[in-house]
Image (spheres, rainbow, N blue to C red):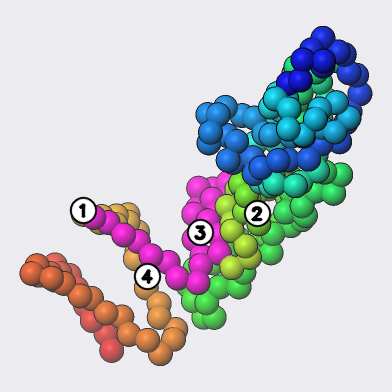
Amino acid sequence: MAEQFIGVEATGVYVGKLVEDMIDTVSREKKLYCNVYIPNFFAENSNYPLTYVPFWAMSLPLKKDDKVLVEFHQGNLMFPVLYKNPDEIDEGFYKKFDIPNGVTNGRANQPSAVDTVGAFRLGENSYVIKTDNYTLIHQGNNGYICIDNDGKTYIQGTDINIIANGNLNIDASGDIKLTNTGTGNIDVKTGSGNFTVNDHLKVTL
């Protein structure tokens, strides 16, 4: 910070501009700060202090050249704090997430979409959504992970991939139902091991 600014008080809220992506500042400093240039007080090439990022703003994917509002803790220019996000917030914070349609004639019943009561933004178009009926994680609009109030879990996506470098164990105390409604095959491929079933297997064609 330039020497002439030390001890100067500043009350109110001021417009600043990010000099770099917030993630780059956090990666370098290992602390929750972003690099905001505030032209009302600082020269752009001066050693001004970094701006503290409060917990509510941790999920904002602030980028270089984004405009933000900053206040100074106790009016001290040495302690800038991110005041608020832009006035227009992303609709992902409040809009009901429309659960994509499932497989026609499939067996998995999806939950009914309800209004959002809370949300946490993980990044651009990526959210954790809380409703009165379920909690949902989604990236874009084509897939999601959902846990409802009864503990039922739903996963949907363009492709679902499960990878286990060791054993993969799937346990069910009830029925296991598998439906393939398309024209593709159900394929089981083994390496040097064997594909084994117990004595209760019944195949109906």
Q: Which of marks 1 and 4 is in front?
A: 1
Q: Give the range drawn in magenta.
A: 143-165
| Kind of residue indicated by mark 2 | Glu
Q: Earlier in the sequence, mark 4 or mark 2?
A: 2
| Kind of residue indicated by mark 3 | Tyr
Residue depicted at x 64% and y 44%? 21
Numbered label attached to residue 154: 3
Which quarter of the rendered picture does the C terminus lie within? bottom left
* Label 3 secondary element: strand
The answer to whether the residues at label 3 and label 4 have Cβ atoms under 8 Å apart is no
Whole-angstrom CA distance, mark 4 to mark 2, is: 36 Å
Residue at mark 2: 124
Q: Judge by depth and name the residue closer to the eye, 105 or 10.
A: 10
| Kind of residue indicated by mark 1 | Gly
Numbered label attached to residue 177: 4
Relative to 16, 144 lies left or right: left
Residue depicted at x 54% and y 80%? 104
The answer to whether the residues at label 1 and label 2 have Cβ atoms under 8 Å apart is no
Q: Earlier in the sequence, mark 1 or mark 2?
A: 2
Residue at mark 1: 166
Whole-angstrom CA distance, mark 1 to mark 4, is: 24 Å
Q: Within 10 Å of the Cα at label 4, are there few (<14), some (14-19), or many (20+) other Cα atoms?
A: few
Residue depicted at x 61% and y 46%? 122
How far across and down, in percent of the image, does residue 58 sit?
A: 65, 36
Q: Which of marks 3 and 4 is in front?
A: 3
- Work out whether residue 189 can be spotted: yes
